[in-house]
Image: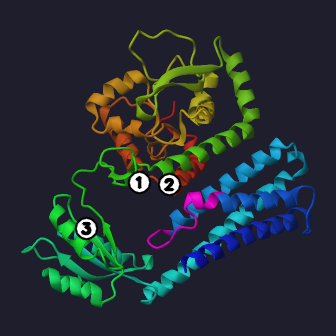
Amino acid sequence: MRYLEGLLARLFDVSMVICGAAIASKVRFDYIAAHDYSAAFVALSAAFALTLFPGFGVYESWRGRGKIMLASQVALAWLVVQGCALVLIFSVHRIDHVSRLWFAYWTASSGGLMIAGRIVTHAVLARMRHAGTNLHQVAIVGCGAHCESLVARIERESHAGFRASAVFNASAGTPLSVRASVFEDFDAFVNAVREQNVHEVWLALPLSHEGTILRFVNEFRDDLVNVRFIPDVRSLALFESNVTDLLGEPAINLVASPLSASARLHKEIFDRLFALAAIIGVSPLLIGIAIAVKLSSRGPVLFRQRRKGADGRVFTIYKFRSMCLHSEEAGVLHQARRDDPRVTKVGAFLRRTSLDELPQFFNVLRGEMSVVGPRPHAIEHDDIYQKVVSGYIHRYRVKPGITGWAQINGFRGETDRIEKMEGRVAYDLYYLGNWSFALDMQIIAATIFKGFRHSNAY
């Protein structure tokens, strides 16, 4: 069944690639026909989609996944496919034979159709599951608030396709407040799992319940029942824990980068493609600003400063110079303040509009920064705040960004009080603990539409 579903999904995607190209031709040229190298371009993208989509999890089971996450995975995968096809067409010197406007229409049309098809299917399945069909029966072994919250989430998110049919209370004498049938006798619970055709047993237990975990694993070893361990590590984990692979062994991240290896790869690919497109798109603006900076005052066009990136690695950040040349005392850095006499007239405009940050797209292209992430601070400030702001060190667990969750929520500019830095770090840690491609897109959109100007930027 899964093979058939995967095959149909692949056929659907190829159909939408072709259909989107036809729509783009109709909109751009007012007729549907292969022209120049567009047919080869479409075939190339379809082949890339079939090859690359599985690596982005596009064809994995949707059960338990939200629509936003599903749409963001498809969008990212399709953008990467189009980027790869574009690079290949460019490398064989045929890019001039393809209409740029047609390509943009095609990318938007096919991506929208693929996402819309999945959302419609997702909605149909959700209605079926609300009606009590296409459900996976789940039995839960747990104790305390962790078990109760898991059962509540299953009931609240019924569209995910799970139903808690039985619960085993692993903490005898402490009642569980759940609507499902609760068992405290081991044999009675096991019989219920087998008689009710339960598909999965979830072990929602603390790490200290090793004996109970082994008992249930051994009991269902010879049954066609999925046994999954959902450990209660909330008292230990800094971020929402995830599982990674180390030397072929599963490892639960308690204090580590909250982004999985695949998430980091997807983010890296998006960052490079976005930075390249941004540099090409704003290149006339970059040239104009460079000339204005050079004419405004004596000194270099770019301001360079050492900052800390992912894992504390030091790199050189680029900005358009916004101040007159001046000297700083060794080990001391004075932040720009309101009506700072060091800021030039051109520099004041660049700082208010954040246009001085544009050269950082080159940092992104070099792999030193990300489009979205915690903003990097001067090393002198890192050394100070790392000692006095709780959680500050964990900003280094991902690459710093040109924009971030803290910035679009008002935490920009001078941090003249410790409370300002604490607020900024709180937003940065929220971003790290709740990262998703959809959240990155939200931050980018907010930056474009409202984030370039802010009263704290001076």
Q: 411 or 21: nearer the eye?
A: 21
**Numbered badge on residue 439:** 2
Q: CA distance from mark 1 to mark 2?
A: 8 Å
Specify whether 98 is left or right of 287.
Answer: right
| Residue bearing mark 3 | 204
Q: How is the image coloured?
A: rainbow
User: Is residue 416 toward the left or the right of residue 444 in the image?
Assistant: left
Q: Could you classify mark 1 by the number of other residues whose Cα lies within 10 Å: few (under 14), some (14-19), or many (20 or more)?
A: few
Of circles 3 and 1, the one toward us is 3
Q: CA distance from mark 3 to mark 1?
A: 22 Å
Q: Amino acid at mark 2?
A: Leu
Is 53 colored magenta in this rendering?
A: yes
Front: mark 3 or 2: 3
Residue found 39% across the figure and 31% down from its top: 415
Q: Amino acid at mark 3?
A: Ala
- Which region is colored magenta? 52-66
In the rendered image, the vertical position of residue 54 relative to residue 258, given as above or below: below
Q: Which residue is mark 1?
A: 434
* Residue 382 occupies quadrant: top left
Disc 2 element: helix
